[in-house]
Image (cartoon, rainbow, N blue to C red):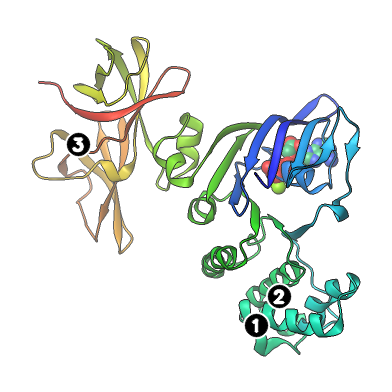
Amino acid sequence: MPEILLKNVTKKWGGFTAVENLNLEIEDGAFITLLGPSGCGKTTTLRMIAGLETPSSGEILIDGKVVFSSEQGINISAAKRDIGFLFQNYALWPHMTVYQNIAFGLETLKWKKSDIEKRVAEMLETLQITQFAQRYPSELSGGQQQRVAIARTLAPSPKVLFMDEPLSNLDAKLRGEMRTELKRLHADTGSTFVYVTHDQLEAMTMATKICLMKEGVLQQYDPPLKVYSLPANRFVADFVGNPTMNFIPASVKNVSEKSALVTMLGESFDFVSETPFEIAEGNATVGVRPEYLPISDDGAIHGTAYSTLPAGMETTVKIKVGNTILSSVMFGSLDYATDSNLRFTITGNMILLFDKNEKCVAHGTMVKHK
Ligand SMILES: Nc1ncnc2c1ncn2[C@@H]1O[C@H](COP(=O)(O)OP(=O)(O)O)[C@@H](O)[C@H]1O
Ligand SMILES: [Mg+2]
């Protein structure tokens, strides 16, 4: 049974629709990220599941139980939904020690003193903050405070943990560390995590499934690597991955069941897919991830080095072909003189074809037409 089920959930404010007809099934023990640009409806969705916002219509079930139904007039309060929260502003109580901060919620729930002691000790250990138990929040770094906030949220063992951009106040290095710890914590606790972020890397690295939204409408709900390699449309393809996917203007003809002749970058290519697809002849867009454009001396396509950006482990090379600038990512540290000639290939079977409505209609290989 899925832990959380949303059926046709819509939220309107006056004439404005913040979330439109959302259907979502969150499995027990999943780590879901709600991902999308600012204002797309992530927080609203999270708050509706949690019971902090009332949907305009639809139905929400948690663990098989209807917690909201516009038709049946059911709306169970947040306090009775057995969930925990971790918000961006995780304000700890400044006059309480770390220990007291974590214990407080359990005292409110009237836990026995010995159980509280045991649970707080467990939480301190899990979050590796045992040595700070007697300190006050002001005596801790931002990252340590964040861990206390997580410990406080997890202490009552909520079945579902909601997090709304909990790492956005942290610096880049700490954010990276916390990603590791949250993923670890998810594995250790077995709880269901629902996590809001606008950061695609955060979503890619932590989630078991990404729910990608745009203007209140669900675009794709799939595991991260599927969203990455088989995006539903150009918006999704563009939103995940860094450097972003290359979108190359193209024109398509001679379309048969599993192949098409594609003209782009001033050349003709045979596009071949393993599965049948349909696309109208005429304008289209070819999508190529930067890692599928390797530079090599015998590459079939000619271009020039527009700029080279070595980052140590990998190098991003901007290649100019006619008026188009492409990104290629190569392993290792490389340097190509600005405007020097180079050659590259389009490799792999994950080259994407987008129709003129920006829908991804096929993935396949692309070789120069002979
Ligand atoms: N209380 C509210 N009243 C009116 N509009 C709101 C309210 N809360 C959010 N919105 C609007 O709903 C949209 C979605 O907001 P939100 O869910 O907070 O987006 P996100 O978390 O993805 O950045 C935004 O356009 C926002 O301005
Ligand atoms: Mg938000």
User: Label 3: which residue?
Assistant: 303
The residue that appears at 70% across and 73% down in the rendered structure is 151
Which comes sooner in the sequence, label 2 or label 3?
2
Q: Is label 2 in contact with label 3 (beta carbons under 8 Å)?
A: no
User: Label 3: how many residues lie within 10 Å, few (<14), some (14-19) or many (20+)?
Assistant: many
Tell me the CA gap for discs 3 and 1: 54 Å
Nearer-the-camera pick, 239 or 117: 117
Q: Quadrant of ligand 1?
A: top right
Is label 1 in a helix, a strand or a loop? loop
Disc marking residue 129: 1
Above or below, comparing residue 310 to residue 328 in the picture = below
User: Label 2: which residue?
Assistant: 148
Asked if ligand 2 lies within 8 A of label 2, the reply is: no
Q: Is label 2 in contact with label 1 (beta carbons under 8 Å)?
A: yes
Which comes sooner in the sequence, label 2 or label 1?
1
The reply to whether residue 22 is visible in this rendering is yes
In the visual, does 227 lie left or right of 25? left
Tell me the CA gap for discs 2 and 3: 53 Å
Give the residue type that dot 2 points to. Answer: Val
